[in-house]
Image: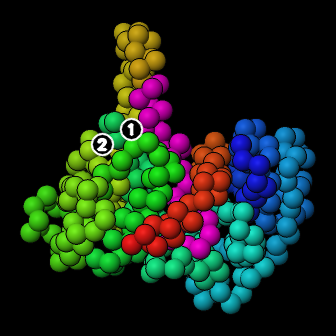
Amino acid sequence: MSNRQITIAIDAMGGENSPLKILKGSEIFSIFNKNVKLLFFGNSEKIQNTIEINKLNLSNYDIVHCEDIVDDEDTPNTILRSRKDSSIYKGLKFVKDNPESGFVSAGNTAAIMILSRLILGMIPGIDRPAICSDIPNKKSFSLMLDLGANVLVDASHLFQFALMGYSYFSIIDPKRIPKIGIINIGTENNKGLEFLQEANELLSNSFLKNNFVGFIEPNNITLGDCDIILSDGYTGNIILKTAEGLSEFITTNLRNIFKKSYKNKIAFKLLENDFKIFKDKINPEKYNGATLIGLNGISVKSHGSASPYAFSYALKKCFNFINNNLNQKIIQNFKNL
């Protein structure tokens, strides 16, 4: 544990079943991170009552009262004009003014993206933030970006994503030399849209050339041969949601198969430990918390329907990025260019 006083600003009102879910997830996180200050933003009376009624074991925390609520239906103009006393706005303002902090929310994705960029600003040299997260594969995990922040990108954006992903990877797996690839419809250099071919050329002639493996096809993502996977946000978001749905489909059908008969139940008992390991590996709750990387501050988006257990993983990610100076590493890599 670092001796630094790290604070996580938490949107207590975002997502389903809030603030109870958010507070329970914070309780799970705080069990192993008692020195991390938790700062809850939202309706102070509702937050405090929820803690007391449910007898949550939270000690190192404070509450900042917020009057406004950001709804899922709110437009960007409404958010910017009329939601400055919301938990998202005030939480991000706190992070802007306090370098040893980060922000976590399960709320309105558009609001988090817009306000994060507006309030925190961009790291010098980065044009756009990217949503990134780790995804399981056959060997361990890969990092994928962008997962939805930018529908349209050009080659220079993909190069910046590669640089940010390289910096991110040095935190989550410092011992591995990451391989970088670009999602495409084929592995040949002449395949795909023009901006993909231009990005391929950029990376092949950059200081990352020894890490770059070229194009990879979506069906090879889970092989684990590529550690950092680059994509435009439109393609990346489709891949992510398809993977989440497929994971649920596989686990649900396996569960139903083993309930069908007495023999199947015996078979499950024989294989129970192996199935638990498999389920744990593809469990999306363990990968909850997508980072808006490239911002001049730490902002993590939790899934809106995440369980308390899953939300605790988003908090864990946020803490690791602050503690390991993610933004400083990205800035240093740009200087090295």
Q: Quadrant of residue 19?
A: bottom right
Query: What residue sits 75% from the left and 75% below the top?
Result: 97
Q: Quadrant of residue 187?
A: bottom left
Any mark on residue 85, and which?
A: none
Q: Determine contact: label 2, label 1, CB under 8 Å.
A: yes
- Colour approach in the figure: rainbow
**Which amino acid is tagged 2?**
Gly
As rendered, which of 212 and 190 lies closer to the eye?
Answer: 212
Please indicate whether residue 98 sits to the left or right of residue 117 in the image: right
Crowding around mark 2 (Cα neighbors within 10 Å: few <14, some 14 to 19, many 20+) is: some
* Residue at 17%, 77% in the rendered image: 194
Expressed as whole percent of the image width and height from the top left, the position of residue 4 reads 76, 54
| Left or right of 129, for residue 12 | right
Callout 1 secondary element: loop
- Residue bearing mark 2: 224
Q: As shown in the figure, which amino acid type bears the numbered disc 1?
A: Ser
Picture quarter with the C terminus: bottom left
Range drawn in magenta? 276-305
Q: Is residue 161 above or below residue 213?
A: below
Q: Residues within 10 Å of mark 1 (few under 14, many from 20)?
A: few
- Judging from the image, what secondary structure is the residue with disc 2 in? loop
Up-down relation of residue 296 to residue 251 (above or below): below
Q: List x then y, in percent, for residue 163.
A: 40, 66
41 relative to 320, above or below: below
- Residue in front for this viewpoint, 87 or 221: 221
* Residue 88 rendering spot, x and y as whole percentages: 69, 71
Tell me the residue at 40%/15% (across/down).
Answer: 271
298 inside magenta stretch: yes
Q: Is residue 330 magenta?
A: no
The quarter of the rendered structure image containing the N terminus is top right
From mark 2 to mark 1, how far is it between C-alphas? 7 Å
- Which residue matches tag 1? 140
